[in-house]
Image (tube, rainbow, N blue to C red):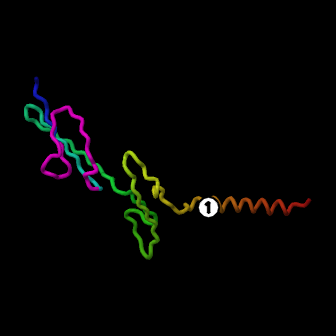
């Protein structure tokens, strides 16, 4: 039997690998053990002759409650008092979805108000014209 390549998997800058296998391999990465935020998956492959190949894959974990905020954007320049609407809700697990709190309330966008005002103005214009016509 021919020797196989070895695969070593690291997370972030940890000196100890989370797994080591002979190629090919199917592997399940359990992100529930990682904190939310950005991480780096590093895969090192060593062939039978000793040559190494490295592949780095950045990824982001979001296992915790989703956080939604309205009233400020990233890198915004602000002053004064800011009214903020903040919602946080858990997603449950992969077998059960938690519906309670999963919809984030939002204020009505300005373009909707413009459409409503435009429609009401148009309707008033035609009502005035209709009642001002001689019969």
Q: According to the image, label 1 marks what residue?
A: 114
The extreme bottom residue here reads: 80
Region in magenta = 9-35
| Quadrant the N terminus occupies | top left
Dot 1, crowdedness within 10 Å: few (<14), some or many (≥20)? few
* Residue drawn 38% across the image and 52% down it: 92
Frontmost residue, 121 versus 23: 23
Please indicate whether residue 104 sits to the left or right of residue 11 in the image. Answer: right
* Residue drawn 47% across the image and 71% down it: 83
* Residue drawn 43% across the image and 62% down it: 87
Find residue 2 and report its horizontal and vertical position in percent: 11, 24
Find residue 16 and report its horizontal and vertical position in percent: 13, 49
The extreme top residue here reads: 1
* Residue drawn 46% across the image and 56% down it: 100
Which is the main secondary structure of the residues drawn in magenta?
Answer: loop
Find residue 113 and report its horizontal and vertical position in percent: 60, 62
Residue 106 vs 13, above or below: the answer is below
In the picture, residue 89 is in which quadrant?
bottom left
Residue 33 is covered by the magenta coloring: yes
Residue 31 vs 2, above or below: the answer is below
Frontmost residue, 80 versus 97: 97
Please indicate whether residue 103 sits to the left or right of residue 117 in the image. Answer: left
Residue 36 is covered by the magenta coloring: no
Tag 1 secondary structure: helix
Frontmost residue, 2 versus 129: 2
Residue 109 vs 29, above or below: the answer is below
Please indicate whether residue 55 sits to the left or right of residue 92 in the image. Answer: left
| Quadrant the C terminus occupies | bottom right
Find residue 120 and report its horizontal and vertical position in percent: 70, 61
């Amino acid at each position: 039997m021919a020797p196989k390549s070895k695969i070593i998997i690291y997370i972030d800058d940890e000196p100890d690998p989370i797994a080591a296998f002979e190629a090919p391999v199917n592997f399940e990465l359990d992100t529930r053990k990682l904190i939310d935020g950005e991480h780096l998956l590093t895969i090192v492959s060593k062939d039978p002759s000793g040559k190494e190949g490295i592949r780095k894959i950045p990824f982001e974990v979001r296992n915790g409650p989703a956080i939604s905020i309205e009233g400020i954007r990233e890198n915004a320049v602000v002053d004064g008092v800011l009214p903020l609407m903040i919602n946080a809700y858990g997603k449950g697990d992969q077998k059960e979805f938690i519906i309670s709190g999963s919809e984030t309330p939002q204020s009505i966008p300005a373009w909707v108000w413009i459409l409503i005002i435009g429609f009401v103005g148009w309707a008033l214009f035609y009502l005035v014209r209709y009642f001002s016509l001689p019969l």
